[in-house]
Image: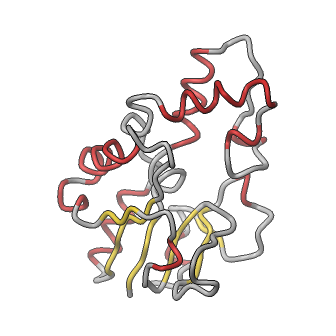
């Protein structure tokens, strides 16, 4: 079985890093706690007059590299690998990719180890990647393939609870994926 694992919001704490930087830089401005998020793209949750400030944080140096790991992610990936699954990190870089691409590689090496660097798939279109399962926090994935070969299992986040499909966390991944 081949399993694709998204990075931001699934194994790397994108929202935690954003909120940490936002609150430090703009303590007097509105912020949206993760529990209250209703949109996938963090920028969409903020009023127009704050969107450029959100974007500045997302593209600044070290944003992607400094994210902390999501609790339980590394253990789950290691266990999947020990169970004989082919596991790949399948992540989409920002269109403003100057820091993002390199820092995603640096993050994987730092938190997962150098062997995992060989298993990174960077793509703007995950529908063209062949696998059995994609674990991703984005509620809707579109691309060239209207019906991807993989089953999309949602990594549970407050902003994706509108989608009607199987969802999981690193605490219940085996039960959701009916493994073991």
The image's colouring method is secondary structure
- Judging depth in this view, the residue of 175 and 34 nearest the camera is 34
- At 28% across and 83% down in the image, what residue appears? 84
Q: Where is residue 162 in the image (x, y as percent from the top left)?
A: 80, 64
Vertical position of residue 66 compared to residue 176: above or below = above
Outermost residue on the left side: it is 114
- At 27% across and 44% down in the image, what residue appears? 106
Report which quarter residue 51 is drawn in.
Answer: top right
Left or right position of 147 against 32: left
Vertical position of residue 179 compared to residue 69: above or below = below
Q: Where is residue 95 in the image (x, y as percent from the top left)?
A: 51, 49
Q: In which quarter of the image is the C terminus?
A: bottom left
Report which quarter residue 99 is drawn in.
Answer: top left
Q: In which quarter of the image is the N terminus?
A: bottom left
Report which quarter residue 44 is drawn in.
Answer: top right
Left or right position of 159 against 95: right
- Judging depth in this view, the residue of 72 and 29 nearest the camera is 29
Vertical position of residue 23 compared to residue 118: above or below = above
Q: Position of residue 115 (x, y in %)?
A: 18, 61
- Judging depth in this view, the residue of 103 and 81 nearest the camera is 103
- At 48% across and 79% down in the image, what residue appears? 128
Outermost residue on the top side: it is 28
Vertical position of residue 167 compared to residue 29: above or below = below
- At 78% across and 24% down in the image, what residue appears? 49
Count how many numbered circles sit on residues in the image. Answer: 0
């Amino acid at each position: 079985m081949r399993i694709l694992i998204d990075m931001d919001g699934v194994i790397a704490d994108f929202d935690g890093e954003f909120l940490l930087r936002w609150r430090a830089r703009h303590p007097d401005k509105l912020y949206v706690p993760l529990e209250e998020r209703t949109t996938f793209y963090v920028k969409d949750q903020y009023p127009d007059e704050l969107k450029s400030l959100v974007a500045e944080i997302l593209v600044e140096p070290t944003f992607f590299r400094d994210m902390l790991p999501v609790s339980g992610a590394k253990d789950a990936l290691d266990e999947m690998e020990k169970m004989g699954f082919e596991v790949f990190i399948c992540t989409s870089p920002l269109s403003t990719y100057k820091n993002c691409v390199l820092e995603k590689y640096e993050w994987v090496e730092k938190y997962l180890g150098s062997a995992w660097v060989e298993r990174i798939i960077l793509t703007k279109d995950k529908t063209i990647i062949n696998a059995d399962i994609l674990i991703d926090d984005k509620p809707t994935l579109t691309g060239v393939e209207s019906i991807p070969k993989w089953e999309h299992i949602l990594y549970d986040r407050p902003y994706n609870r509108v989608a009607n499909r199987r969802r999981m966390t690193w605490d219940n991944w085996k039960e959701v994926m009916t493994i073991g």
